[in-house]
Image: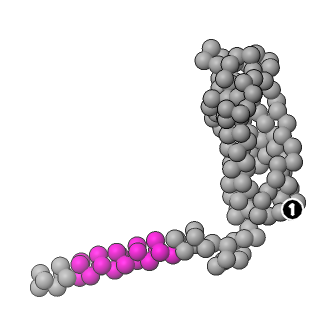
């Protein structure tokens, strides 16, 4: 009698294991193929918001990384940056706008980034940028303008 009860528990564990594997496989398919398997997801506001946030995040990092190279003039060069908050402000089919709160560490205190003497004792400068992005080429969104609150 004990063997049958134990066998049922083992069978339940196997079934649970198989269900967990199937769920993981399905989740992997959705994450990898998402929009092409489920076209309704492509048009959902939630999916669009995620794509815009990913695009905005990539563009912000490209923007700040452009100030880190040795070919950048010393007064504009930064040694580090932190993105503190990214917010989508407006969107339509052709473009979207977002804001970024950030901190940068300029190469020196007499910097383009420190125009209002906002640097703290450790030389980090906080500010806010507003981006407008052209979405007319879906494969390669392009920044139309960047406005700084510095």
Percent of width and height locating residue 122:
60, 18
Q: Is residue 61 visible?
A: yes
Magenta region, main secondary structure:
helix
| Residue 128 falls within the magenta-colored stretch | no
Q: Nearer the viewer, residue 124 or 72?
A: 72
Percent of width and height locating residue 87:
74, 45
Residue drawn at x 44%, y 77% is: 22
Q: Nearer the viewer, residue 24 or 139?
A: 139
Percent of width and height locating residue 73:
75, 27
Q: From the viewer's perspective, is 21 left or right of 46?
A: left
Q: From the viewer's perspective, is 149 left or right of 35?
A: right
Residue drawn at x 68%, y 48% is: 57
Compared to residue 65, the image places residue 124 above or below, namely: above
Disc 1: CA contacts within 10 A as few (<14), some (14-19) or many (>=20):
few
Image quadrant assignment for residue 106: top right
Q: Which residue is mark 1?
A: 136
Q: From the viewer's perspective, is 1 left or right of 23?
A: left
Percent of width and height locating residue 105:
65, 26
Compared to residue 72, the image places residue 42 above or below, namely: below
Q: Is residue 85 visible?
A: no
Compared to residue 13, the image places residue 71 above or below, namely: above
Element type at marker 1? loop
Q: Nearer the viewer, residue 88 or 144?
A: 144
Image quadrant assignment for residue 69: top right
Question: On the rendered image, what quadrant is the C terminus found in?
Answer: top right
Q: Nearer the viewer, residue 77 or 33?
A: 77
Q: From the viewer's perspective, is 147 left or right of 54?
A: right
Question: On the rendered image, what quadrant is the N terminus found in?
Answer: bottom left
In magenta, the rendered stretch is 8-26
Applied colour scheme: one colour
Residue drawn at x 62%, y 31% is: 80
């Amino acid at each position: 009698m004990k063997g049958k009860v134990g066998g049922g528990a083992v069978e339940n564990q196997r079934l649970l294991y198989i269900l967990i594997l199937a769920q993981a496989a399905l989740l992997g398919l959705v994450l990898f193929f998402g929009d092409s398997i489920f076209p309704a997801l492509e048009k959902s506001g939630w999916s669009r918001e995620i794509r815009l946030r990913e695009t905005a995040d990539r563009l912000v990092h490209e923007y700040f990384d452009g100030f880190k190279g040795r070919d950048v003039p010393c007064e504009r060069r930064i040694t580090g940056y932190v993105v503190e908050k990214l917010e989508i402000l407006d969107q339509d089919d052709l473009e979207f706008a977002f804001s970024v709160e950030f901190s940068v560490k300029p190469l020196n205190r007499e910097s383009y980034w420190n125009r209002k003497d906002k640097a703290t004792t450790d030389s980090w400068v906080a500010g806010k940028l507003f981006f407008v992005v052209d979405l007319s080429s879906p494969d390669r969104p392009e920044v139309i303008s960047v406005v700084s609150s510095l």
